[in-house]
Structures are given as C-alpha cells and as structure tokens.
Image (cartoon, helix red, strand yellow):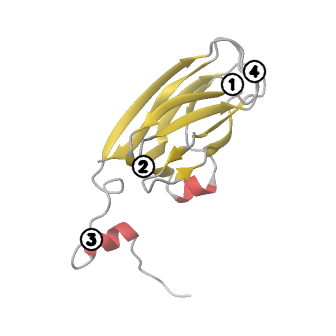
Amino acid sequence: MAVTTQKTTEYTNQTASPVTLNPTTSYHGRIRVASFVHDQSGVGDAGSTVSLIRLPAGTVKVLLHSSVMYVNWTASSQTLDLGWEAYTDAAGDAVAADPDGLVDGLDVDTAGYFAMSGALATVKAAGGTYTFTSRDGVVIAAKAIGALADGDDIAGYIQYVVD
C-alpha cells in the first residue's frame, strides 16, 4: 500500500485550469427553510401519510441531518418513513413515489425531536443529503407504519440548498 493524496470532485473543479464552477447546491448556495405543522384529524390506518412540504422546482439539495421534526404519534411501537410523492424531473420524465427514500423505519415510539438523517446508505454516502431535480417541485411526505390517532402531531422544518 502507498500513501495517497486525493481531491474531492468539488476541490478538483476549484483547482482546475480553467476553473470549473461547482453547482450552487454544492458551493455558495443559499440555505432555505420550509416549516410544517400537522395535527392529525381523525384516526388514520397503518400506512397513512402526511404531505409535509413542497420543495421548489429546479435542483434542490435537502440537508437531512440539519432538518428536524417533532413527532408525537401515540400508537405503540410507532415508526415513520420519510420520502417523496411522485414528481416530474427536469427532463420531463416521471419519477415514482418513494415513501421511504429519505428515512426508512425511524423509531418514533417515544414523542420527541428527531433529525431526518436515517440509516439509508444512499443518504449517508451523500453526506446526509439528497438532491432532487424537478420541473414542478417535489412533495416530501411522512408515512406512519402504525395507525395514527386523532390529535397526533408532526411539526418541524426541512433545510435545503438552492440558488
């Protein structure tokens, strides 16, 4: 084995001659915040969903580890999936819904605050982020694995980079 000295793609772009500009979602982008509050109205069976927010159209990088939600879903042994509803990408192609594409099986059995950084390898490999490129925006949704009770709450914010 040998000692190596390597560069990230972004640093390689910055040190190239001529310089290659990094996308704003990776360098010098603006962090935006989208807040949400939901109080369950009526009982929801297992698999019920709550549409949280719509991300703007274009390229948007969601900062999952910096995004937080308070969850008070009172069913015993409750878990939550976080993903997206079907959308159209920038090329006009349909992208299927993925109810657990961001967080799969987050244990929310005890009410409290939770970071949206799940254990999915694809999210971890991207530094706790996920990038969407859409024509009309992307709806982020939470899915209850167990039933939802009347009055169950979910509230928080999602941070994302755009511009």
Q: Secondary structure at mark 1?
A: loop
Res. 75 image quadrant? top right
| Labelled disc at residue 75 | 4
Looking at this view, name the residue that lies furthest to the front: 92
Q: Is residue 29 left or right of residue 117?
A: left
Residue at (27, 71) in percent of width and height: 20
Q: State yes or no: discs 1 and 3 in contact (Cβ < 8 Å).
A: no
Q: Position of residue 132 (x, y in %)?
A: 46, 50
Nearest the viewer among 25 and 2 is: 25
Q: How many residues crowd mark 3 within 10 Å: few (<14), some (14–19), many (20+)?
A: few
| Cα separation between marks 1 and 3 | 47 Å
Would you name the residue on which mark 2 appears? 61
Of marks 2 and 3, which one's residue comes earlier in the chain? 3
Q: Amino acid at mark 3?
A: Thr
Of marks 2 and 1, which one's residue comes earlier in the chain? 2
Q: How many residues crowd mark 2 within 10 Å: few (<14), some (14–19), many (20+)?
A: many
Would you name the residue on which mark 1 appears? 110
Q: Is residue 10 left or right of residue 109?
A: left
Q: Position of residue 47 (x, y in %)?
A: 73, 30
